């Protein structure tokens, strides 16, 4: 009985060992094959028809089309403030009044100078007439007559000078009342009642008025690599942080010729016109702009991942993308004499990748337009190899024995 039990245990142990070796062999084969049979180790995508829109992107700032800075030509203390932020104003409406006392006193002094000049003119006129009569009777010399004529001219000039001073002082007095030059909305106010306004070398800015917030513009900067494709009239879409789930539309209005260079990067200002009837868009908002530079409808499209794919470990059939030198060509390089860029895609043939040269057009960064008939609609192209390369397996392979 003991011998029988011993033999049974030996048979059981041998069966267990054989089973373990079988399992280890299966695992070894599974790992060596990449976990998949040869034909299913690749992820593919189907070439299909659809529409493509190619855009160029940049950030910009929303601004009113016309922004007017209102300043003061005269100095003084702010006496009355008639408007505030966000107030709608009309052209000619009073915005602010400065204390007119100083300007009023200067005007009164100038008026007194005019009265004095008028009196001097009357005296000089009478003297000139009297002297001329005496000269005709030869009671005075020619020199005395000339002196009276000169005094008359000087009196007239003095009156003209004082009259001009009166006109200037009246203008300065009227400038103590600041009026809006345009109709619009007050977007900035930098003074308060009682504050002193000092106008010396230049007019200080008191208010900023946006003429029409229903029509705005985005000032963006595009790199020189993209500027060649941007033209006036192209459609644009943009988003702002205030409304992240909403897309707004615009039109390219201007491509300014003045370049800006920062850290050896050349950019150009592109102005995008925007309609803002709901007044939801505000000056200063950051806009994330996409300008449409090309559109295609009902064209063959291939995944960009397929254009980036390259076989590993030489696991492919004859590679038609290799030139005479045997080195692979670039992903999207132009063939000599061709107008369209060229690319390489891989299809499965007998379980192995096969290279196919294709002509490509525009791209939306996810799909690329296929030109020609080198690849048909519905063809499966490889976009990924799920098996790691030999180098990767060598570094992480598991030793079974």
Image: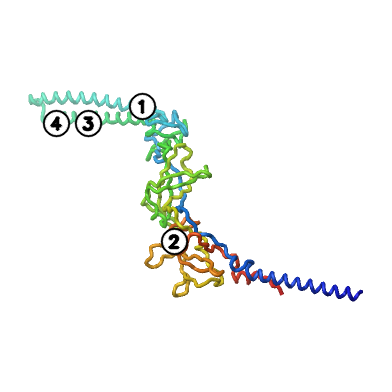
Q: Comparing marks 4 and 2, which lies closer to the viewer? A: 2
List x then y, in percent, for residue 150. Answer: 17, 31
Element under disc 1: helix
Q: What residue is pinned by disc 4?
A: 146
**Numbered label tally:** 4
Q: Nearer the viewer, residue 100 or 337?
A: 337
Residue 244 in percent (x, y) is at 53, 44
Q: Nearer the viewer, mark 1 or mark 2?
A: 2
Q: Residue at x 47, y 32 (%)?
A: 84
List x then y, in percent, for residue 59: 47, 49
Residue hosting label 2: 360
Q: Is residue 54 visible?
A: no
User: In the picture shown, does residue 294 fall above or below 396?
Assistant: above
Q: In this view of the protein, which residue sits in the foreground, 143 or 133?
A: 133
Crowding near the residue tagged with mark 3, few <14, some 14–19, many ≥20 C-alpha atoms within 10 Å: some
* 245 and 358: which is toward the camera: 358
Residue 174 against residue 347 in the figure, above or below: above
Image disc number at residue 105: 1
The answer to which of marks 4 and 2 sits earlier in the sequence is: 4
- Residue in the picture at 47% in, 40% down: 281
In the rendered image, which residue does mark 3 sit on? 157
Earlier along the polypeptide chain: callout 4 or callout 3? 4
Residue 55 spot, x, y in % from top left? 45, 53
Separation of disc 4 and disc 3 at Cα? 17 Å
Q: Secondary structure at mark 4?
A: helix
**Up/down of 69 relative to 169, above or below:** below
How many neighbours does mark 2 have within 10 angstroms: few (below 14), some (14-19), or many (20 or more)? many
285 vs 321: above or below: above
């Amino acid at each position: 009985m003991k011998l029988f039990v011993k033999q049974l245990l030996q048979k059981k142990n041998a069966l267990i060992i054989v089973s373990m070796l079988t399992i280890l062999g299966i695992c070894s084969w599974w790992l060596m094959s990449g976990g998949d049979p040869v034909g299913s180790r690749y992820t593919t995508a189907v070439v299909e028809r659809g529409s493509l829109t190619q855009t160029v992107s940049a950030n910009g700032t929303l601004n009113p089309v016309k922004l007017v800075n209102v300043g003061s030509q005269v100095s003084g203390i702010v006496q009355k403030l008639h408007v505030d932020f966000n107030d709608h104003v009309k052209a000619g409406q009073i915005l602010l009044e400065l204390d007119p006392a100083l300007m009023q006193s200067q005007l009164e002094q100038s008026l007194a100078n005019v009265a004095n000049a008028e009196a001097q003119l009357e005296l000089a006129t009478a003297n000139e007439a009297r002297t001329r009569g005496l000269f005709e009777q030869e009671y005075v010399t020619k020199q005395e007559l000339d002196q009276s004529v000169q005094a008359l001219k000087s009196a007239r000039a003095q009156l003209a000078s004082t009259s001009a001073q009166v006109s200037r002082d009246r203008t300065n007095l009227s400038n103590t009342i600041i009026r809006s030059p345009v109709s619009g909305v007050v977007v900035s106010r930098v003074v308060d009642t009682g504050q002193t306004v000092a106008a010396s070398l230049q007019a200080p800015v008191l208010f900023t008025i946006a003429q029409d917030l229903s029509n705005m513009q985005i000032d963006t900067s595009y790199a020189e690599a993209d500027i060649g494709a941007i033209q006036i009239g192209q459609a644009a879409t943009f988003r702002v942080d205030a409304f992240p789930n909403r897309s707004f539309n615009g039109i390219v209005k201007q491509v300014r010729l003045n370049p800006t260079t920062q850290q050896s990067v050349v950019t150009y200002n592109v102005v995008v016109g925007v309609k803002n009837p709901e007044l939801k868009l505000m000056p200063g908002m950051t806009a994330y702009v996409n300008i449409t530079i090309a559109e295609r409808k009902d064209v063959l499209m291939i995944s960009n991942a397929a254009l980036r794919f390259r076989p590993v470990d030489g696991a492919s059939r004859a590679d038609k993308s290799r030139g005479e030198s045997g080195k692979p060509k670039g992903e999207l390089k132009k063939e000599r004499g061709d107008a369209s860029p060229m690319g390489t895609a891989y299809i499965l043939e007998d379980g192995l990748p096969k290279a196919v040269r294709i002509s490509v057009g525009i791209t939306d960064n996810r799909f690329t337009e296929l030109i020609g008939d080198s690849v048909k609609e519905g063809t499966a192209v490889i976009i990924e190899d799920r098996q790691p390369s030999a180098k990767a397996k060598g570094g992480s392979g598991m030793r079974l024995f």
